[in-house]
Image (spheres, coloured by chain):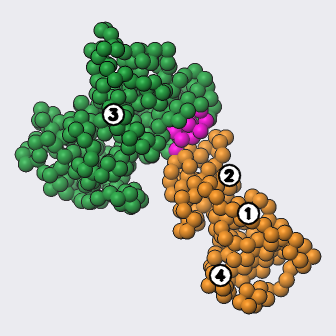
Chain colours: A green, B orange
Amino acid sequence: MAGLITMDDLTNEQIINILDDATRLLPVAKGELFLPLLQGRILGNLFFEPSTRTRMSFETAMKRLGGEVVNLGDIKNSSVVKGETLFDTIQMVDGYTDIIAMRHPRQGAAQYAQDSANVPIMNGGDGAGHHPTQTMLDLFTIRQAHGTLEGLKVVLAGDLRYGRTVHSLSHALTRFGCELIFASPELLKMPAEIVSDLREHGANVVETEDLLGSINDADVVYMTRIQKERFADEDEYARCAGAYKLHADNLADVKSEMIIMHPLPRVDEIHASVDSTRHACYFNQAFNGVVARMALICYLLGITVPIDVESEGGAL
Amino acid sequence: MANEHSMRRVTAIRNGTVIDHIPSGQALRVLEMLGIGGKSSVPVSLVMNVPSKKMGAKDIIKVEDRELTQTELDRLALVAPDAHVAIIRAYSVAEKLTINLGTEVLNVVRCTFSNCITTNLREPLPHRLKVISRDPLHIRCHYCGRPQDLDELIKNVL
């Protein structure tokens, strides 16, 4: 069965259908209704790297729909440290579960797992590769705020070189005709191969080092964390990181409906003063990880989300 | 005429393989990809940049006492997908071999990206590269999606 390894596995129409399903599942994700669409189904959570939000939101998504979850647990206590190949691990979990969510430090691991498995694999991040379930929740959040994905002006800021989140999202937004502004220090620019790939696919891309000069006519500002370990010396880090911070004072002239997103965890790139503004969207975005993954699991398992969730669902 | 003239630049071989219509300047890459030359002891004749009606200019390699295997043809396809390969026995063309660079290169070379899942040599699935375009050659790893540089790939022959 096909899984979700990169966003190329979904057409725009499929993306919209899954986002529509997710919208209808919101009361279930919030715990206002119980709808056991996944009763009797088991998710295998295979996280070979640390994860908080992604792992927990997959688990919550499954449980909100009445399904069960088995976890690989700490890899220090698993067969992986004994030298088990990914192929063998997948063979085992494939037999135990109906669908697998996986994060792995090696790029290409998700496709490799899909080629080894019979059940669908959901890529929760493979090295610096892809993170399509994050992209689905990002798209859900953007559409929730703006009512559309078409033709928006989106600023992606911070570490665009190593952030797999922004790579997957840029490709997806290009498919919906969004204008992209990449605001980052020179050292952390979006890889040239990705920029040229996006342009080949018709993207309107602007690259700049000036974040604050880019946000006033944006519909979305997507912040990412700049990691200290990427820099050779601390002074250079401090200089760069300082230019990619948002404070409530910076938002005086932005569009009223502009949203600020962040895949989290943040360090200090979004000041706490932003949290109480109408633009802060990152905690809602994190919550949307549950509902987007609920809809995605249903889609990959071929389970139809009812049109009228309210009447199908029961009280808790 | 140009072809006949260029073929006469080196002597005919009794037994072995002639690789003709190699893109001009690529002969050394072909030898490297096939692991011929250097330490191998078979006699090799090579002409480079000879005129060709079809290609403008081309390279030709003659390898004595060695017939290319299918695996070697698959490697050759990456460097010279339109080359002509003839097996020579007793001074005559005994077989003409076809090179086929399809949409996928299976178990010929390993992905060059150091963090690709396939760098774990104990993983049992085949090494798979996808041919995105033939001219210019554009290849990506099936698993990690990274574009592959031909000079790097030559070092990763399986």
**What's the amino acid at mark 1?**
Leu
Residue B88 in magenta? no
Q: What chain letter is assigned to the residue under label 3?
A: A
Q: Which residue position holds label 1?
A: B73
The residues tagged by marks 3 and 1 sit, at their Cα atoms, a distance apart of 48 Å
Q: Which residues are magenta?
A: A108-117
**What's the amino acid at mark 4?**
Lys
Asked if the residue at tag 1 contacts the one at tag 2, i.e. Cβ–Cβ closer than 8 Å, the answer is no
Among numbered discs 2 and 4, the one appearing first in the sequence: 4
Q: Is residue A133 left or right of residue B8?
A: left
What secondary structure do most residues of the magenta stretch adopt? helix
User: Of the numbered discs in the image, which one, if any, rests on residue A5?
Assistant: none
Q: Residue furthest right?
A: B90
| Residue at (12% x, 32% y) in the render | A276
Q: Assess disc 2: are there few (<14), some (14-19) or many (≥20) residues with their C-alpha within 10 Å of its C-alpha.
A: some
The picture places residue A289, in percent across and down from the top left corner, at 33, 30
Q: Is residue A29 above or below residue B111?
A: above
Camera-near label (3 vs 2) is: 3
The picture places residue A99, in percent across and down from the top left corner, at 51, 26
Q: Which residue position holds label 4?
A: B54
Residue A115 in magenta? yes
Q: Is residue A101 above or below residue A142?
A: above
| Residue at (49% x, 27% y) in the render | A301
Q: Is residue A10 above or below residue B95?
A: above
User: Of the numbered discs in the image, which one, if any, rests on residue A19?
Assistant: 3
Q: Which residue position holds label 2?
A: B107
| Residue at (17% x, 54% y) in the render | A214
The picture places residue B39, in percent across and down from the top left corner, at 77, 69
| Residue at (66% x, 85% y) in the render | B53
Q: Assess disc 4: are there few (<14), some (14-19) or many (≥20) residues with their C-alpha within 10 Å of its C-alpha.
A: few
